[in-house]
Amino acid sequence: MTRQHTAIFGWSLALLVAAVFCALGGWQLQRMHQKEALLAQLPPSRAAAVSLAQAAAAPDALHWVADQLQFLPATVLLDNQLRESRAGIKVYQPARAANGAVVLVDLGWLPMPADRSLPAITPLQGTQAVQGLWAPAPASGIALGPALTATTQPQTWLATRIDLAAIAAQLKLGNSALAPRVLRLDPAMRLGYARDLDLLPNTLPPSRHLGYAVQWFAMALAVLLIALVLQFKRRRKAGVGNGG
């Protein structure tokens, strides 16, 4: 390989790596802006509660929902959820509104034993009057591997992330698709398990995303500077060799 080919290969590799780092930095900035926009929304008033159908008509806003929902016989357990520094799972159960729409209801958190044996879950049954916060599903980050794994418990899946399309396929909802957000059950209700209404649970705050974005962009710049220094040294060495 000639020196010219070596230089072309080196610069191509450097530009590729820098582009990947810039893409990762851009993704971090995007996540920062999404979370800032979420936190900037005013908390919805319980006195202005809407039905699930009304919330779904304006899916990007936070809503306080009060509705009658029919719980379906299925459970999704979201793994790797921390509460008070303890590892555990979040329990989700799909429920259907009167208009046929299906929403994942966040029933709360349960601790995961050291041997990672799943706790026995008794799904809610029938139609229940519920209220809670219409909010985004937990952020999944970079998706790696399958979102859902079947467990030994009937109609129960262990999830690495909330992938609404994958969950809808497992539930065989037919023409009914899962709502684009989840319903986080009111902590004051006696249904379910320990929970709160933190908008960014088990996830990074916007400031951390900005910090990571700066790091990725700095690494991209460092790669280009290293490539430039190596190119300068190669030219200098070639010049000395030709002069000799």
Image: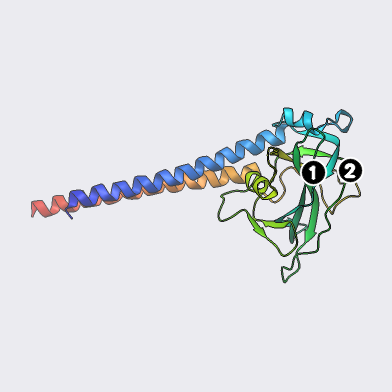
Local secondary structure at mark 2? strand
The residue under label 1 is 95
Determine whether label 2 and label 1 are within 8 Å by CB.
yes
Q: Amino acid at mark 1?
A: Ala
**Any mark on residue 111, and which?**
none
Q: Point out the image quarter for the N terminus.
A: bottom left
List x then y, in percent, for residue 175. 68, 37
Q: Is residue 177 above or below residue 85?
A: above
Q: Is residue 83 depicted above or below 173 in this figure?
A: below
Question: Where's residue 41, x and y in %?
Answer: 73, 31
Name the one closer to the observer, 63 or 206.
63
The image quadrant where one finds the C terminus is bottom left
- In percent of width and height, residue 31 lies at 60, 40
Colouring of the image:
rainbow
**Camera sees residue 221:** no
Inter-mark Cα distance, 2 to 1 = 9 Å
Nearest to the observer: residue 214 or residue 72: 72
- Across and down, in percent, residue 176 comes to 70, 38
Which residue matches tag 2? 128
Image-based side of 204 in relation to 101, left or right? left
Residue 46 occupies quadrant: top right
Please give the name of the residue rendered at 59% of the width and 44% of the height, measured from the top-left corner.
209
Q: Residues within 10 Å of mark 1 (few under 14, many from 20)?
A: many
Vertical side of 112 occupied by 186: above or below: above
Residue plotted at (55% across, 47% down)? 212
Q: Secondary structure at mark 1?
A: strand
Residue at the location (57% across, 38% down)? 30
